[in-house]
Image (tube, coloured by chain):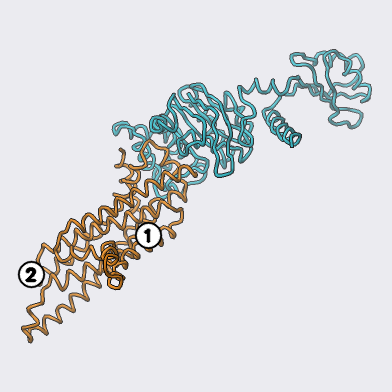
Chain colours: A cyan, B orange
Amino acid sequence: MIEVEHLTKNYGLVTAISDVSFSVAPGQIVGFLGPNGAGKSTAMRILACFMPASSGVARVAGHDVFRESMEVRRRIGYLPESVPLYTDMRVAPYLDFVAEVKGVPRGERRRRVADVMDRCMVADVQNRLIGKLSKGYRQRVGLAQAIVSDPEVLILDEPTIGLDPKQITEIRSLIKSLAGQHTVILSTHILPEVSMVCDAVIIINKGSIVAQGPIDTLVEQFFPTARVEVEIGGPPPAVRDRIRAIPGVLSVQDQAIANGAGRYLVEAARGRDVRGELFQLAAQQRWDLLELKRVGMTLEEVFIRIVAGEEAGEEIRA
Amino acid sequence: MRIWPIFKKELRLYFTSPVAWVVFTIFLLIGGYFFYSIFAFFTLASMQSAMNPSMARDLNVTDSVMRPLFSNISVILLLLMPLVTMRLFAEERRAGTIELLLTYPVRDGAVLAGKYLAALVLYAIMIGLTTLYPVIVVYFARLEWGPVLTGYLGLLLMGATFIAVGVFASSLTENQIVASITTFGVLLIFWILGWSADYAGGTTGRVLQFLSLLEHNESFAKGVLDTKDILYYLNFTVLALFLTLRSLEARRWTG
């Protein structure tokens, strides 16, 4: 649905993104992840036909964003990061205006506007001036204007920024409900958001893509080990040696040692579950097994590892 | 071309915000004062000429009331119109709403046309309100409607030019004050260009005179319809609108 090939954008001498390539399948929700200033917004602005790229090609539903811009614009809903709305307009007339500009037929407009107001939970403020609304409501009105024409592709730049936790949950479930019929590309720098909402992730740093793919694959790729956290009451040196002796264990790290009990992080080869052996070990040695749990690899760690790795690599090159 | 929704939105915005009402009030207040002064002076002159019949021959209400009124009104417009047009693009740019507007499936030309026509309609309503003055005159004296109609046509064409220049200036900046001062400056320069025509003389003088916004409006108020004047305003308008389109496009590239 979205194909991007070798996209580069320069602002004068500054390169915002360079040689970015990715593709998004129909019905997927893809997260665009990166620190602030990584080039997420620039890539989205190019996809939304707001600005042309310096070089490279971007296609939405098979249409080039530069040469067939009108075809692309008919198929997208876009929410810029700053959520720019006409503050002097009231919610319902504003959405009606957007629907009309986007070519929703006159007969369907009223129903469509009422429908998106319900879905985005802004029906209760439909007669209020947008300028008087809270940030949460504005964000939802922004989302409503993006989906009012029922577009195939949604481009959402930081859709949950500045919301309170309850609103974030609501917006996320709204976006999730769009999957299937809509292709969604959303940017964020909040990592848990991506694992909660998205099917796949594109990690961008300093204008280039550093990793992309389904979240599980990325986690496996960057964390090839399985990790277990264990707390055992016993003499630490002995505990450490015994754990290390279990076949398949790659490393043991101390996390905290206090009052004769120690907390250790055990890394084993992926696919190898050492929890049973740890229990047996403690039982044999008559040590107290206080806690035993598997540690999941979070996207957060993947992200930090990738971005930190990038920086380290750069320093070496420099 | 989806001009209509943009036109509707812009025109509604003029009337739901205080802009239209304040502009109308100030314009009619000053316009009304001008009309009162000119008409009062005319009354005085006609009373004096009752005693001096040779003076009365040159006295004519169309020439002595409506003509100066049109030229006074154009001075108010020179000051007021930049304030009406400054908002059109500059505010969208400052608020960032231009980013959404220019990614909707409408061409830049349709956006421009919608905004331009909204300002033009506001302007037409504004000068339409001044038709009250000739109506008052008709109550007291016989008026020739021909020159009054051409006078209004002249105002309409001149206003169309003012608005086009204002829209162009507004597309260049995100600061409304900068937009309005630029508009005012450009209009004033073209207004007073004709003044130096007398000293310049020769071809330069004629060119300067031809470029003057003021010069072309004079014949309309006299009741003369000259294609030269009509074309001057139309060309000026089209050029300014063309430059606006280019400026919108250029802004896309630089972000």
Q: Under tag 2, what secondary structure?
A: loop
Q: Earlier in the sequence, mark 1 or mark 2?
A: 2
Give the image location of residue B51, x and y in percent: 7, 87
User: Do we see residue B143 in this rendering?
Assistant: yes
Residue beneath disc 2: B142
Instruction: Tell me which chain the residue with mark 1 is part of.
Output: B
Figure label count: 2
Q: Under tag 1, what secondary structure?
A: helix
Give the image location of residue B80, x and y in percent: 33, 63
Asked whether, in this view, residue A204 is left or right of residue B209, the answer is right
Point 75% across, 16% down: residue = A270
Give the image location of residue A171, x and y in percent: 52, 34
User: Do we see residue A159 in this rendering?
Assistant: no
Residue beneath disc 1: B183
The 10 Å Cα crowd at callout 2, few under 14, some 14 to 19, many 20 or more, is few
Q: Nearer the viewer, residue A122 or A201?
A: A201
Give the image location of residue B42, x and y in percent: 15, 77
Q: Nearer the viewer, residue A297 or A200?
A: A200
Image-quadrant location for residue A234: top right
Point 80% across, 16% down: residue = A275
Q: Type of residue at label 1?
A: Thr
Residue depth check, mark 1 versus mark 2: number of the one nearer the observer? 1
